[in-house]
Image (cartoon, grey):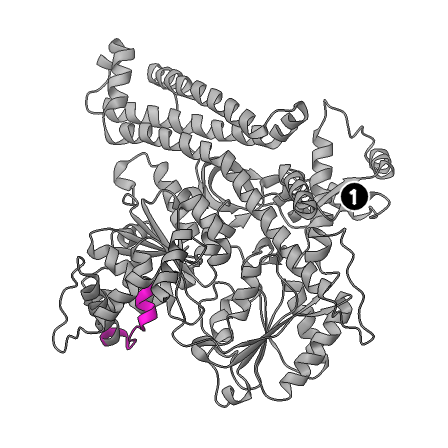
Amino acid sequence: MASFSGFFRNLLDRPGGLNLTPYKKIVEAAGKLSFPDELPEPKMDDLAHFCAVVREAADRTLGLRPYDVQLLGTLALLHGHVAEMATGEGKTLSGAMAAAGYALQGKRVHVISVNDYLAQRDAEWMAPFYEALDVSVGWIGQNSTHEERREAYGKDVCYGPVSEIGFDVLRDRMRTDAGEIIMPPPEVALVDEADSVLVDEARVPLVLAGAADPGDAVPEMAALVRTLVRGYHYEIDEQSRNVFLTPKGADSVESILDVDLYDENEPGTLIELNLALHAHALLTRDVDYIVRDGKVQLINPSRGRVALLQRWPDGLQAAVEAKETLSPTEKGEILDQITVQGLIKRYPQVCGMTGTAVAVSEQLGEFYGLKVAVIPPNKPCVRLDEPDRLYPSGPDRDAALVEEIQEMHATGRPILIGTLDVAESENLAKLLQRRGMEPVVLNAKNDAEEASIIARAGSLGAITVSTQMAGRGTDIRLGEGVAELGGLYVIGSGRHVSSRLDDQLRGRAGRQGDPGGSVFFASMRDDLITQYVPDERPPAADPDGVVRHRRGAYLIAHAQRVAEGVNLEIHRNTWRYTRLLEHQRELILEWRDKVLHGDSAAQALAKADPERWESLDEDTRDDRARQIVLHAIDTCWTEHLAFLSDLREGIHLRALGRMSPVDEFQREAVAEYKTLLAEVERRSLESFEDPARDLKRPSATWTYMVQENPFGTEWDRILKRVTSAVRHG
């Protein structure tokens, strides 16, 4: 009967319903094989033999004998799926076994992680296992040198954070000497924390920039907006995260600056004012960013960590720096860029693993053609997940939260409290300290100590206050006597915009059959409610101050569904714009590669001006021709990116004329691309005929990730439209 129901789950292709029966048979067969003496070479045409060999190799080299469910995860990865494996179920080893399997098939594998720490840790931890199978392994990180990167990419398996792999792709795209290229052609991407990388960060552009100059925010404008009063000078649309001047505010600003803000011939002042106002009113220190070492550092909203090398678009970044009275950082023109989704789609084969994949199975299927395989836990989960505790307001919730923590702490049971942002984690810690408790705080300000903090979180009497737990990479093991107290107790101080993030927090308790518990405290005035279902009227609290009416729980769940729907639609819309750019870049790269690796530049210029060609030195003219054409291609592409950026910024206005912004964007982008090709040829010939022409390139380049400007663009309008449609649909 189980086989029959499994068949229908597979037939209906339900999320997470991938039929595991064939994999279970392979694992069962592997269990009957043993190798008491020398470890044989794995037979990749016999997966049972492969599983048996890698199980024995892991046992002998790491002291870790894979469970059957870990082998199931490995087989799912080898078949190109996303394996959903709960926290503590051994994803790292499953991923290593799958990476070895691909490598033994002669394919180079990039194990893509979310940060440097995990890339280095996992590569070094798994190294003895790979060595036993005669598979070479390396890793790269933010501080890796050019030669270290070249060596790592030359290994059979290379671990690296998604950002650094993307930056190396961009750098290689701009090489003018083929011998400087460090990355081999992409073959297999095995993505750790797949939902975070493939969904949460899919639309984040990775940027290679050059020709630096200081940011241009006006400090005086930041000082001016500090004097403006919300409700009188400006209003905030809480639903769409936008801010705008009132008529009185506009009059006041025009009087102070002695300008006409809405003069079409002088739009710069209004742009500067809007950026300063957005930075002042809508971006909050210790929530959206922190200030550390004299710099603004963004906080990744899905991980609660500092987003290294990430910044907002130049204007908004500079406005926040001016707000914090910091020196402006450099900016420059974008030489090239690629989204995380575009980076992953370069690989012919993609697979991944995470603890929460089913919730984003639609996106994984739509954008990557991936299916989700839900791997059962090695031991049944016995964690007790309590219903949410709901309160009318934030202060009511916080008071109840502190009481719960104090009561539980008195028993000695370790507690992990998940907060939504840095400011909340620090405020809660202060409240607990006033009650005589000593919490340990893990947030974006001290993420360097995260491994040691998490390792102690299961100790008797421990209180750990943390921002997002996704991708922390360390299991919480229970201390002595903790199991008898009920195991780790996880408390959420509010619901996240995605149910996946809630599940990731819950999953820190109940590891490998351990006892544990979880509960979420939330209020009817949390941002999740006020931003995504602001028109809904929450139920009243009971006399004891607790909201028990079932509509309260419904509103929380409904708001999450609206938020998830909004983010999915934004993802779709982003890809509609960027996929054309990715396609055009691939066409340019094909042309560029022919120039870099061949003599097409020499042939073209010799044909265009034979007399000039014959006058040049035979030993240098081929390379000179190559450099001329490469310079023209790269310069024209940079200008093309700038054109598309400007076009994208205002394309939503086409909707006012009942035109499709996406269609109009693509129409103009295609037309502009056609002129780019002719322009490359014109500039190449012009440089060829002028021996004094300097093929100057940026004296320095740097890389960063651009976090979307969340204000004043079409995303706000999409958010508003989709929220309204979902709420009233």
What residue is drawn where x is 87% and y is 38%? Answer: 248
In the rendered image, which quarter contains the N terminus?
Answer: bottom left
Q: Position of residue 588 (x, y in %)?
A: 37, 29
Which quadrant is home to the C terminus? top right
Judging depth in this view, the residue of 288 and 107 nearest the camera is: 107
**Residue in the image at 64% along x and 68% along y:** 425
The answer to which quarter of the image holds residue 493 is bottom right
Q: Residues within 10 Å of mark 1 (few under 14, many from 20)?
A: some
Instruction: Give left or right: position of 661 versus 381.
Output: right
The verdict on residue 406 being magenta is no
Q: Is residue 68 magenta?
A: yes
Q: Position of residue 406 (x, y in %)?
A: 68, 83
Instruction: Between residue 531 and residue 28, name the one nearer to us.
Output: 28
> Going by the image, does 631 lie left or right of 294?
left
Residue holding disc 1:
224
- The amino acid type found where label 1 is placed reads Leu
- Count of marks, rendered view: 1
Query: Does residue 570 show up?
Result: yes
- Residue 167 visible somewhere in the drawing: no
**Residue located 63% across and 37% down the image:** 714
Question: Principal SS element in the magenta part?
Answer: helix
Q: Is residue 340 above or below residue 48?
A: above
Q: Which residues are magenta?
A: 60-72
Q: Position of residue 573 (x, y in %)?
A: 55, 38
User: 681 or 106, which is in the foreground?
Assistant: 106
SS of the residue at dot 1? helix
Residue 347 sits in quarter:
top left
Residue 479 screen position, x and y as percent: 48, 85
Nearer to us in this view, 378 or 114:
378
